[in-house]
Image (spheres, helix red, strand yellow):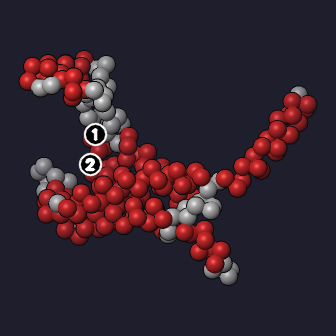
Amino acid sequence: MNAIAGLYYNIHNFIFPRLQHLDGLAPLALRLYLVPIFWMAGTKKLAGIDSTIEWFGNPEWGLGLPAPELLAYMAAYTEAIGALLLLLGLATRWISIPLIVTMLVAIFAVHWDSGWAAIADSSSQEVAVRLGAAKDILREHGNYSWLTEKGSFVILNNGIEFAVTYLLMLFALLFTGGGRYVSVDYYLSRLFPNPR
């Protein structure tokens, strides 16, 4: 057994220390994945800011949040500016905090009541009936083959799945930062080392 453990550690110690210089690639991948998501969300809110404010504040068909004008602008600018900072890897840990808060609000105020799944399970009888009806309507009144040539139709469930995924990615960036060699943060820390 000791020989197996020794072999395991020999292989481990041979491979993984050599990967250390590539450890910035994981935070880079997380950042680049999140950039378009937050950019589109933030700029869409800003482009229709009056509708966003109304949706944030309306208790009947919206979110019913207090101070909807303030929160709408804060969410929109956090997402849009956050996307730019993530793209550059600038203040990555700092911008992760308000983006985490934004995701928590989205999870609990927007998606929570819809459960986990972002896309409805098409094996569910109720979903299958609705999906079948939608396909029949599209076949009869639309160009179904053109509509489906890039992928099949789904029914959006709007659950917390995507928001939780983004939250976990931001949580990782909070602890890793922007990444070695691939972020402005890395070069600023080399230029202005922490005096401690």
Compared to residue 124, the image places residue 118 above or below, namely below
Q: Give SS at disc 1.
A: loop
Residue 133 appears in the picture as rendered: no
Inspect the image, locate mark 1, and give the three-letter code of the amino acid beneath it: Asn
> Which of the pair 114/89 is nearer the observer?
89
Q: Give SS at disc 2.
A: helix
Report whether 34 appears left or right of 133: right
To which residue does mark 2 refer?
Answer: 110
Q: Residue at x 61, y 56 (%)?
A: 24
Q: Residue at x 70, y 56 (%)?
A: 21
Report whether 151 appears left or right of 172: left
Pointer 2 with pointer 1, Cβ within 8 A: yes
To which residue does mark 1 refer?
Answer: 158
Q: Quadrant of the C terminus?
A: bottom right
Instruction: List x then y, in percent, for residue 147.
Output: 21, 29
Mark 2 and mark 1 lie on one chain; the one further toward the N terminus is: 2
Inspect the image, locate mark 2, and give the three-letter code of the amino acid beneath it: Val
